[in-house]
Image (tube, rainbow, N blue to C red):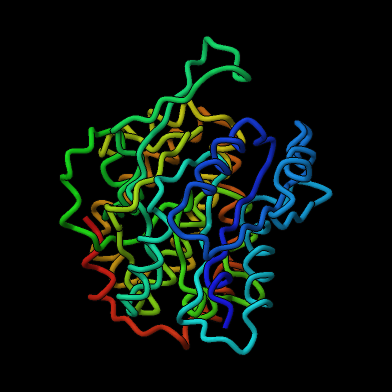
Amino acid sequence: MDEAKRLVVNIVTWNSRWYLPGLFASLDDQETREFTVTVVDNASNDGTPTWLQEQRPDAVLLRNARNQGFARAHNQAITLALSRWEHQDLDRRYVLVANPDLEFSPGALRILTAYMEAHPSVGSCGPKLLRAFVNADIDPETAEATRSDQIDSMGLCIFKSRRVVDRGAGEIDRGQYDDAPEVFGLSGACVLYRASALLAAKTGEEFFDEDFFAYKEDVDLAWRLRSLGFDAHVVPNAVVWHYRRVPSSQDRSWLGALQARRFRSPFVNFLSTRNHGWTIVKNDRLANLMLHLSWWLPYEIAKAVAGLFSFSQLKGQATSFIGFPKMIAKRFKLRPAIKTSDVDIRKWFI
């Protein structure tokens, strides 16, 4: 058994060259060398593939001819990892899904992997994600990053309205979440999956839903894993910094969330709106939705009204509705494997 291949770090790039030196420097500083790196590049035009070929020939590089999206690209990397582990114990093989705009503390990979080894019921775990910043007024080629103690994500929270947010986003880290490790799910910016859990959650040939392209595919997978009976934990001793381009809203009210949409790009707003509906259709339980109707329905009505003033949001709602039959078909494919009751899932809604 080759211990060096027990953990694979999968990174998807798209015009990400600026982040790569810091990312790989932090990987080089890891306390463990028992991992390999796979990069899937989604047709970058900023020199990312050239930098990787010249500076990091040790990383496996897969190049897509066009931007396949977060979900498809990570599925390619996961499939490659599983092909390497044929006939091996997938309960003790791990896939780290990582954004390129991360920097890892030296012990992060060792701590995350050890945690999974010690907690066999955990299907996914994530680090304490903190935010890092770059002065926008400085040339990005020469700017230096500032690692902060501001929380980016301590796991995903899901509200009765079905809105999902990053726990603690924007708060100063004072250890306030360190003693509450179990969460609904983890942010796709940096999450370690047990390979056997990914295989159990696979729908057709997909781990992440490729119809999503990007945004909320991590919520969809987190929900599937919960339905299958896998736990999700945050490991606060493992610290990672994240340069988030689209920060999670710090406003816990759905009115604040709707107002925050004004600052998103139209494409992101379209994807987020469309994929929100698909996530509910694929994963929610009718009994739970009815019990939470007084929270869910006003939020959906408010979104529909907001859509009248936003073409991207209106397009997202219409496209989501058109895609419902396909999402329902995917839902039924997973249904025989579900191991949790409505009550088991309902306890995660706040």
Along the line of sight, which residue is nearer the eye, 342 or 240?
Answer: 240
Is residue 206 rendered to the left or right of residue 299? Answer: right
* Whether residue 87 can be seen here: yes
Q: Residue at x 56, y 58 (%)?
A: 9
Q: In the rendering, at what x and y percent does residue 294 appear?
A: 23, 53
Q: Residue at x 35, y 71 (%)?
A: 286
Q: Residue at x 31, y 61 (%)?
A: 184
Q: In the rendering, at what x and y percent does residue 194 appear?
A: 46, 73
Along the line of sight, which residue is nearer the eye, 289 or 231?
Answer: 231
* Whether residue 276 can be seen here: no
Q: Relative to 346, is 136 above or below?
A: above
Answer with the quarter of the image where residue 153 lies: top left
Q: In the rendering, at what x and y percent does residue 325 appear?
A: 60, 68
Q: Relative to 133, is 191 above or below?
A: below
Along the line of sight, which residue is nearer the eye, 349 or 288?
Answer: 349
Locate the C terminus by quadrant. bottom left
Q: Relative to 121, is 234 above or below?
A: above
Answer with the quarter of the image where residue 62 lies: bottom right
Q: Residue at x 59, y 19 (%)?
A: 140
Is residue 4 rendered to the left or right of residue 114? Answer: right
